[in-house]
Image (tube, rainbow, N blue to C red):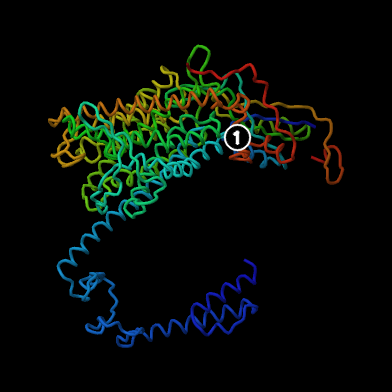
Amino acid sequence: MLPEEVSNYFHRKGTEMTQGTRTISVGRTLRISAIALVVGGLLAAGGWVFAQDKPAAPAAPPAPTAAATPPPPSKPDPAGTATGGIADVTAKTAGKPTLEEIAEFAGHNRVSLNLMWTLLTGFLVMFMQAGFALVETGFTRAKNVAHTMMMNFMVYAIGMTGYWICGFALHMGGLGALSTMGGTGLLDSEFTISLLGKDFGLFGMKGFFLAGSTYDVAVFALFLFQMVFMDTAATIPTGAMAERWKFSSFVVYAFFLSMFSYPIFANWVWGGGWLSQLGKNFGLGHGHVDFAGSSVVHMVGGVTALAGAMVLGPRIGKYNKDGSANPIPGHNIPMGVLGCFILAFGWFGFNPGSTLASSDLRISVIAVNTMLASASGAIFAMFYMWKKYGKPDPSMMVNGMLAGLVAITAPCAFVSSFWAFFIGAVSGVLVCWAAIFIETVMRVDDPVGAIAVHGVNGAWGVLSLGLFSDGTYGDGFNGVEGTVRGLFYGGASQFVAQIIGTVTCFVFIFAASYAFFKIYDLVWGMRVSPEVELEGLDVPEMGAHGYPEIQGPATLVHAMGLSTPKAPAMSTIAPERSR
Amino acid sequence: MKKIEAIIKPFKLDDVKEALTRAGIVGMTLSEVRGFGRQKGHTEMYRGGEYVVDFLPKIKIEVVTTNERAPKVVELIIEAARTGAIGDGKIFVLALEDVVRIRTGEHGEGAI
C-alpha cells in the first residue's frame, strides 16, 4: 500500500470505531491517523465496558412484547452450559413457546443441521479436486505439468457449468421428496417408459439452470453436493488420458460428461431411475444400491477413462516393437502422496456426507469403515509389491489407499468394520494386479493408474456390497422395506441387483464414451502431434511451462523472442494406436 | 600447468572439496553431469516394471594447478573419492597452455 492509502485505510477504520476521528481529514499523515485510531479505539472500548456494567437498559426503544418480560441481564458464559435455552426457541411469547412452536422449531433445527451437514461435506468433496490434481500431475512427467494441472483445474469450472445447465436436471429432476432436507418434492418430473408392465425411469426433467420452481434452499444444497460428486467422476479420465490429449478436446469432453453421460447413469441409481427400482419392481433386494458412488462416480470415471485411453492410444515410447511395456515414472512422488492424503481427507465428506443428514448417526460407522478400508488398501498394496517385485513401490501404495477408498464407497454404510477392512485389503491387491494387467495384457496406457483404481475397484465396491451387507442398516432404502442384506447374510437377490448395476454401468458408459471419443477423434482429432508430445504439452498446448527454470533451454529461447526450437525430426514416429 | 578433471560420485563431493582446500587449492569448478562407463547404467523399478537408467548422475570437478603439484592433487582426489565399489569415476589430467585472469589481464601461473 502507498502511504496515502495506508492513511486512508486507518482513517476509515477510525471512523468506524468512533465518531471522534471523523474530524480528521483524508489528507492527514499516517501517524496522525494511527494515533487517532488507537485513541479512538480505547475510547470505544471504554464506552463498551461502561455499557456492560450498567444494569440492563435496552439501547433501542423496547418492543411491546419485550416490555412484558424484560430480557434477563446478559452474563458471560465461559463454560458454555447456559448458552441456548428456552428463550432461544422462536415463539410469539418469548420464553413461553407453545408445543406447536416447539415442534416447528425442532423440525426446522433438524433440517438446518442436515442441510449444514450436506453443505459442509460437499465443501470437503470439492477439495478432492486438489487431491486429484496433485496425484495426476505428480505421477506424470515434468514437461506436461501445466497441461495436466489445468485439465484438473478447468474440469471443476466446466463441469459445474454443464451440470448447472442440464446435468442436474437430467440427474435429479425426478427424485421426488427428499425427507432429510425438508421433504419438499420439487424435483418431481421423471421421463419413464413402460416395459413388461413396469415403469423404467430414464432421466429427470426438472431443474434446468436451477430456475423456476427449483429455486429452493434444499434443491440448492442438493445441487452443490451432487455437483462435486459429478466433478470427481469427470476428473478421473484426465489422469488416464494425460500427456497426449488435446486441451480443446478435453474441454468438449468435460461438457459431455457433466451434461449427459454422468447424469443419465446417476439418475438410474440415485435419481429414482430404473436401476434403483429393481427391488420395488422385480424383488431384487433394494434395487442397485450404491451408497456414495463406487459405481455412479468412480466406475463411471474409470470406464470413461478406459474408453478415452483406448481411443487416444499409448504415449510415444510406452510400448516396444515386441509389445513389451516401458515404465514412464512420474516426476514428483511427494506431490502424488500429498494428493492422496487430500483425497483421503475429502473422502470423509464423500462417504459420511452421502447420508444427506447429520441426524442419521450411522455416519460414525460410515466414517470408520472408510478409513479402515483405506488403511488395508495401502497395507496390502505395499506387501503385494514388496513380495512380488522386491520393493514397496510408492506410487502403488498411494494407489492402494485410493483403491480401498473407492471400493468402500458403495458398501461403507452397510458392512461391519471387519468386512470394511477385508474389502480394502482385496482392493489393495486388486489394484496392483489390475494396473499391471491393463498395461501389459490389454496394452492400454494409463499414466496414473486411474482405470485400475476407479474402474476396477469401483466394480469391486458395488459387488462387495452385494456380498457383505450385514442387515443392520438401510430400512426403506429405494422404497423397499427391511434392511440391506448381501449374499452372505441371506440376500442373494441383492447380489443379483448389484451385478445388473455393474454390468449396466460398464456397458452404457463404455458405449457412450467410446462413441463420443471415437467420433470426436475422427472429425477433429483428440491427440496432439508427435512433435508436441515429445517436446511436452506445456508450451505448445498451454503457452506456459509448469517449471520454467527447470525446463531451461526452450524457455530461454522463448524469453528472447526467438522461434520455438525445432523438435527432433520425428515424422517417422507415428503414435501407436490401439484398434 | 595442468587441468585436472575428475568425474566422481555426487555424495563424495564434500570429501573431495575438503581434501583439496586443505591442500591449498584455492578454486575449482563443478558441474552436474551424467554418463556411463563399463557398468552401463543400472535398472530401477516403477509399478512392477523394470527400466534402465543409462546415464547415471555424476559430479565433474575441474581444478587447475602447477605441474609440480598436479600428482599430489590427483592423489588427494583418489583418496577422498574412492569407495572401492564400481562407479567411483575417473580422473583426466590435461596439459594447459595458458590461464588468464579476466579482471587484471594476468597470464600464466600467477593467474591460477
- Residue at 31% of width from left, 27% of height from top? A504
Which picture quadrant has residue A80? Answer: bottom left
- Image coords of residue A39 (percent x, y): 52, 83
Q: Nearer the viewer, residue B65 or A29?
A: A29
Quadrant hosting residue B111 = top right
Which residue in the protein does label 1 denote? Answer: A541
Q: Position of residue B54 (x, y in %)?
A: 57, 22
Give residue A503's quadrant in the image: top left
Q: Position of residue B28 (x, y in %)?
A: 71, 39
- Tell which of A240 and B96 is nearer to you: A240
SS state under label 1: helix
Please indicate whether residue A483 sits to the left or right of residue A350 in the image: left
Total residue callouts: 1
Q: Position of residue A238 (x, y in %)?
A: 47, 33
- The answer, for residue A408, to whether it is visible in the render is no
Dot 1, how many residues are within 10 Å of its Cα: few (below 14), some (14-19), or many (20+)?
some
Chain of the residue under the numbered disc 1 shown in the image: A
Residue at image position (77%, 32%) is B68
Mark 1 belongs to which amino acid? Answer: Glu
- Classify B112 as above or below A282: below
Q: Which residue is painted at 23% across and 48% down in the image?
A: A364
Q: Position of A378 compared to A277: left or right?
A: right
Image quadrant holding the N terminus of chain A, namely bottom right
For residue A314, above or below residue A22: above
Nearest the viewer among A546 and B66 is A546
From this viewpoint, is residue A298 visible? yes
